[in-house]
Image (spheres, rainbow, N blue to C red):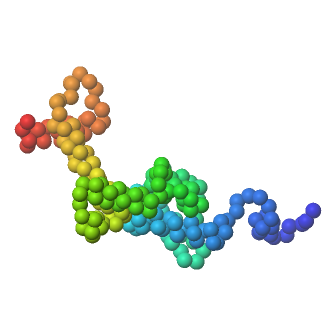
Amino acid sequence: MKRVTKRGRLRRERQATGPGRRKVPAPEATRICARLRQFVREHYGTLYELREVIGLPKSTMQGWTRSKGPQTPDTATLLVLAREARLSLNWLLLGEGPERRGALLTDVELHDALRRTLIADLLGGGANELMVERVVPAGRTLYRRIVQDYARLLKRLTMDVGMRVLLGPPLKKSAPATRKARRIMPLRDALRGAFPP
């Protein structure tokens, strides 16, 4: 049995040879962080916008962007990314499959398929092939426009439904008012006077 004279000596020996928590090799860590930065850039714009969505500390996310020895996300952070940002862990860790969880195609395949389908439909309707090629934007641009249009539509629908709830029929007096109903009732009464039915 070896006699351990310094506290850190045993720990270093265990890390070097034995089982336990291991660090991700540097080339793998660099590739993982590059894929993560690519995902953030394409879907959120900046790390800080992603930070607002999933609520991670600034220092954690800055570790992913270091050029020397980037830090890979830990297991808890990977779970948050998979659940909140719908990031596919297979794609992030291994570079395989689509970027988003539940997607059937990778983003590039989806963008290309969308553009090809649109061009085929336009050509099937009798459009000039040269004009179609010039007018139809790249698949990525098409996809972003579709997502933005649906985001605007959902925002309008949410606002419309919210106004209907606020301007709806009065709550029953016999039913005990919930905390949310108590907050809405004064606002609804004020709006009812401003917007007659």
Seen in the picture, residue 83 relative to 112 is either above or below; the reply is above
**Which residue appears farthest toward the bottom when viewing the image?**
68
Give the side of residue 135 with respect to residue 3, left or right: left
Seen in the picture, residue 160 relative to 133 is either above or below; the reply is above
**Which residue appears farthest toward the top when viewing the image?**
174
Q: Nearer the viewer, residue 138 or 107?
A: 138
Give the image location of residue 180, x and y in percent.
Answer: 29, 37
Give the image location of residue 55, x and y in percent.
Answer: 44, 57
Would residue 86 be visible to someone looking at this image?
Answer: yes
Q: Residue at x 56, y 66 (%)?
A: 32
Quadrant occupied by the C terminus: top left
**Which residue appears farthest toward the right when viewing the image?**
1
Give the image location of residue 91, x and y in percent.
Answer: 54, 59
Q: Residue at x 16, y 30 (%)?
A: 169
Q: Residue at x 70, y 59 (%)?
A: 21
Give the image location of residue 56, x and y in percent.
Answer: 47, 59
Would residue 64 be visible to someone looking at this image?
Answer: no
Q: Residue at x 90, y 66 (%)?
A: 3
Quadrant occupied by the N terminus: bottom right
Q: Nearer the viewer, residue 193 or 83?
A: 83
Give the side of residue 122 with respect to residue 44, left or right: left
How many badges with numbers are in the image? 0
Give the side of residue 49 with respect to residue 24, left or right: left
